[in-house]
């Protein structure tokens, strides 16, 4: 796709609590890709993040706290805004499913989908106390009794609207199979195709308002409220003010939709079916990142091994956080997080390798900055492996390329001992080192934007710089 615009999205987190480390990971992955596209491919960006704010769980949590659901989500969403700010996420748009513009888009989509909807019966296990259905699996897990209310689940049957996703099943599976809608990595594509080998089923897209009140009403039938996916997925279009603001056509289809592996079946199955029903193009790529475990276990409140991203950010800062999660967590795989590994990477790599390199070069430049400031810095191309890794969304490998250059430059300085040189030799050797650090800073820019900027500023300053150490040891 050769166009000027670049549109990237995340899967908007559910606002029923504070953000967790997985949300932070998704933010930084999408942000590094967005920055890369702007810097190296000069694309005009739309980068949307946001929150999914409706549903029974939220209504229930709000009630527990004695709050109106809107007040409850406003409180939680503030933490997501804060996290995005603290991580230095350069998003262009923030969509909330409680916004009027979202409701407008969703209702429009509903009308357009009418030819593919029908009323049907939904049967499931229901807790009146929770005002919610549970899945068959949850029912089994809790032996038929709601753990919150100690009352048995009831079998309830109710009338809902269904979307004929099955009508689009063959087409969607063909487009996924031939990579028109490309799922990255291939292993997730295979998993998805195996999961839906009997076809994409029709999906219930509403609930009676009496069992689901906190949501968007079905147009012309206020006895029904839109259910989960039909409410949340259209955020990718509502954030563009589809269909009222014609600029949506410059950005749709999305270039990349970033998501966790647990929701691929909806993003790769149901969402494309909705788009086909609307007569819209499918997104170009679905990027599926892994999940982060802690000491080999899933992070969960009950185990007590949850890592609060804000705690790490407070101690180490945004670039240190971005460094660990973009270089040491492989973009496309699950991986393990421990505080010890994080701290080791910070001290050994950020502080010793990058921090020292920058301060060594600063010291050398300070001897005669005027001599160097006249030498223009060139925008030298970064290696093909760097760009190749970005093209495959293996951000950690692109980052590795830059890190090899950092290590090589440290070695070159140790070997050439420029502090012993004088005159033309000194100027030539240090000019080369200065140019190499500049190219490194450009490579770092999508990953560590603040650090990259600080290095560039230092390299172009004509005055002696008293440099505060980058990444002081912790
Ligand atoms: Zn219950």
Image: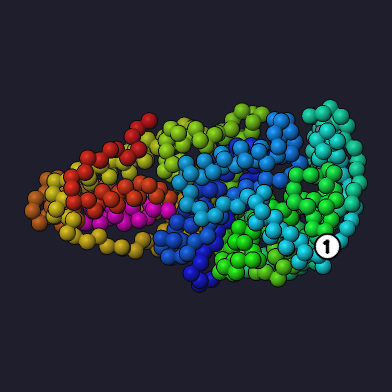
Q: Residue at x 51, y 51 (%)?
A: 29
Q: Secondary structure at mark 1?
A: strand
Residue extent of the magenta highlight = 432-446
Residue 92, magenta (yes or no):
no
Query: Which quadrant of the rendered structure holds the C terminus?
Result: top left
Q: Is residue 13 above or below residue 339?
A: below
Of the four image quadrants, the one with ligand 1 is: top right
Where does label 1 land, which residue?
Answer: 117
- Residue 65 drawn above or below residue 189: above
- Percent x, y for residue 417? 17, 46
Relative to the observer, which residue lies in front, 103 or 156? Answer: 103
Q: Residue at x 55, y 58 (%)?
A: 8
Q: What residue is drawn where x is 81% and y is 40%?
A: 132
Assess mark 1: CB under 8 A from ligand 1? no
Is 207 placed left or right of 190 in the picture? right
Magenta part, dominant SS: helix
Considering depth in this image, is 76 or 372 the residue closer to the camera? 76
């Amino acid at each position: 796709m050769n166009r000027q615009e670049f549109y990237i999205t995340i899967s908007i987190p559910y606002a029923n609590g504070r953000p967790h480390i997985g949300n932070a990971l998704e933010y930084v992955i999408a942000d590094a890709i967005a920055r890369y596209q702007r810097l190296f491919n000069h694309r005009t960006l739309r980068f949307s993040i946001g929150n999914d704010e409706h549903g029974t769980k939220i209504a229930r949590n709000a009630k527990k706290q004695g709050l109106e659901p809107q007040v409850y989500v406003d409180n939680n969403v503030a933490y997501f805004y804060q996290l995005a700010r603290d991580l230095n996420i350069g998003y262009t748009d923030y969509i909330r499913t409680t916004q009027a513009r979202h409701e407008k888009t969703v209702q429009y989509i509903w009308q357009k989908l009418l030819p593919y909807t029908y009323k049907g019966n939904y049967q499931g296990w229901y807790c009146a106390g929770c005002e919610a259905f549970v899945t068959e699996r949850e029912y089994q897990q809790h032996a038929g009794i709601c753990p919150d209310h100690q009352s048995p689940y009831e079998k309830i049957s109710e009338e809902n609207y269904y979307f004929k996703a099955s009508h689009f099943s063959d087409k969607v599976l063909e487009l996924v199979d031939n990579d028109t809608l490309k799922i990255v990595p291939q292993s997730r594509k295979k998993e998805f195709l195996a999961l839906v080998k009997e076809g994409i089923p029709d999906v219930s897209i509403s609930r009676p308002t009496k069992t689901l009140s906190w949501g968007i009403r079905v147009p012309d039938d206020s006895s029904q409220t839109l259910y989960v996916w039909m409410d949340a997925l259209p955020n990718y279009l509502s954030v563009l003010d589809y269909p009222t603001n014609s600029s949506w056509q410059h950005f749709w289809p999305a270039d990349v939709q970033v998501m966790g592996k647990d929701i691929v079946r909806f993003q790769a199955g149901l969402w494309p079916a909705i788009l086909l029903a609307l007569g819209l193009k499918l997104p170009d790529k679905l990027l599926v990142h892994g999940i982060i475990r802690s000491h080999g276990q899933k992070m969960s409140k009950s185990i007590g091994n949850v890592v609060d991203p804000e705690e790490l950010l407070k101690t180490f800062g945004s670039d240190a956080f971005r460094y660990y999660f973009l270089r040491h967590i492989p973009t496309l795989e699950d991986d393990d997080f421990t505080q010890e590994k994080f701290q080791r990477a910070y001290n050994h790599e950020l502080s010793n390798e990058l921090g020292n390199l920058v301060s060594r070069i600063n010291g050398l430049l300070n001897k005669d900055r005027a001599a160097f400031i006249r030498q223009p810095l060139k925008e030298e191309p970064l290696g093909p492996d760097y760009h190749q890794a970005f093209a495959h969304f293996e951000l950690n490998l692109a980052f590795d390329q830059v890190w090899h250059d950092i290590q090589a430059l440290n070695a070159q300085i140790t070997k050439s001992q420029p502090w012993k040189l004088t005159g033309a030799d000194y100027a030539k050797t240090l000019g080369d080192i200065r140019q190499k650090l500049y190219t490194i800073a450009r490579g770092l820019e999508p990953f560590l934007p603040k650090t990259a900027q600080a290095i560039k500023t230092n390299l172009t300053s004509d005055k002696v710089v008293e440099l505060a150490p980058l990444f002081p040891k912790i």
